[in-house]
Amino acid sequence: MSMHIISPGMLTTVQDLGRRGYMASGFQQGGAMDQFAARAANILLDNSESDGVLEMTLLGVKAYFDEDNVIAITGAEFAPTVTDSETGEVTELPMNCAVRVKKGDVLDCGSAGSGLRGYLAVAGGFYIAPVIGSMSTNLKCKVGGFEGRKLKSGDVLPLRYPQSDLYGMTSRVFEPEKQKDGAVTVHVIPGPQDDYFSDKGKNIFYSETYSVTGDSDRMGIKLDGTPVESVDGVDIISDGIVAGSVQIPSSGKPIIMMADRQTTGGYAKIATVITSDLPLLAQLRPGGSLRFEKVDLQYAVKRIKQDNKLLKKLQYKILRADTSISGS
């Protein structure tokens, strides 16, 4: 009961919601860059929200299963297809819903037409032993996931409880919000070291349209634009870094710390991206643009509640379909 990798794509790793509670010991949290999409993929298949998924960057995996299974692909807009192992017929697969894949059929996730990272979940989950409480792959430390590395051709990923079908398949559909063209608005809470920057520097930060550079990665998103002016330098005594911390290094150009960030840093942080906007950042390609907008803590909490409500609504829709089938 396994998934056999024919082609791994550009950068595909096993990820979940990360290693929580270990940053004080110096170990990175990691986990899926777009956790909302990863959670949705698992919910569509009755998995735990924290189950492992495949995070595919720009180019998706090509693989086959040795048993019938049900999968879901969320996140960036890939163009998945499945090739019938007997007839050779190629069928397009929809995204953001549960779909059946037969034994031996070849799944090709294709490439992302928009966005950057897609998430592939399998019903019943992957059978991968957690390391320090998580299946997430830490590429730098070479731990977790599948042998602590990105996937390669010939890998065989064991499955935990493959499912050939799920009740209420037509109800297992998720409709993500479509992103508008142009610069993305990223909401931030000022601080914790915004007093290190001049009024001019702060005005630049909140008015500039920044572009994502090509050397951005899972550790941080580096931005190009007008440098942010400090009062008297940006060096601080190293302190903790959370996902979304916006550091301003000596160049004055912001770096947004992401899933594989270090646990501490010695540059002043002018602002912190709210949790609900981290998925937007995870889907920005090099060359993409963004603007920062200041909000308060109440707004950030409101957005988290809205996100959780959307996922609970999806769970309820699936559960209601099950109740309807059981009662008929």
Image (cartoon, grey):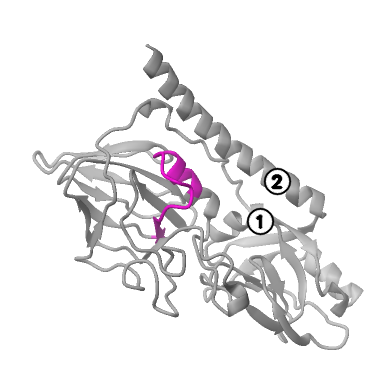
| Residue in the image at 55% along x and 67% along y | 259
The residue singled out by tag 2 in the image is 303
**Is 170 on the left-hand or right-hand side of 163?**
right
Residue at the extreme right: 199
Q: Position of residue 325 (x, y in %)?
A: 38, 18
The residue singled out by tag 1 in the image is 275
**Amino acid, disc 2:** Arg
256 relative to 157, above or below:
below
Q: Mark 1 touching mark 2, by CB under 8 A?
A: yes
Q: Which of 179 and 23 is in front in this view?
A: 23
Q: Position of residue 66 (x, y in %)?
A: 16, 49
Q: Of callouts 1 and 2, which one flags the residue occurring earlier in the amino acid sequence?
A: 1
| Residue in the image at 56% along x and 64% along y | 20
- Magenta stretch holds residue 74: no
Tag 1, which secondary structure? helix
Quarter of the figure with the C terminus: top left
**Is 315 on the left-hand or right-hand side of 125?**
right
